[in-house]
Image (cartoon, rainbow, N blue to C red):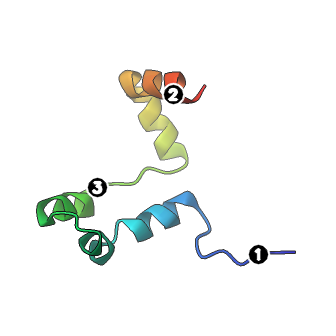
Amino acid sequence: AEKKREFRTATDLLKSFLKQDNLRERGIPENLVASMKKAKIFEHDDMWLFIKKEKGFSQLLKREYF
């Protein structure tokens, strides 16, 4: 049976979590809310290109998850 999900992808979930009102309700300071609003979420090919370019981040991911 199909289950109706509120979010189709992890990006949808993350974008919902990072909405300003949601952050304020959770007690996140206003200066951090403003910074998070400007953040870019990488997905699909853009994410893999970013990981490939950032050697330190790539090594961290390998250590933590593989």
- Amino acid type, residue under disc 3 in the picture: Ala
Report helix, strand or loop for mark 1: loop
Residue found farthest to the left: 31
| Marks 3 and 2 close (CB-CB < 8 Å) | no
In the picture, residue 28 is in which quadrant? bottom left
- Amino acid type, residue under disc 1 in the picture: Lys
- The residue tagged 1 is 3
Q: Earlier in the sequence, mark 2 or mark 1?
A: 1
Cα distance, mark 3 to mark 2?
A: 23 Å
Q: What is the x, y in percent for residue 23?
A: 29, 69
Against 40, residue 16 (above or below) is below
- Amino acid type, residue under disc 2 in the picture: Glu
Residue at point 28%, 55% (across, down): 39
In this view, the mark in front (3 or 2): 2
Residue 39 tag number: 3
Image quarter in which the N terminus is found: bottom right
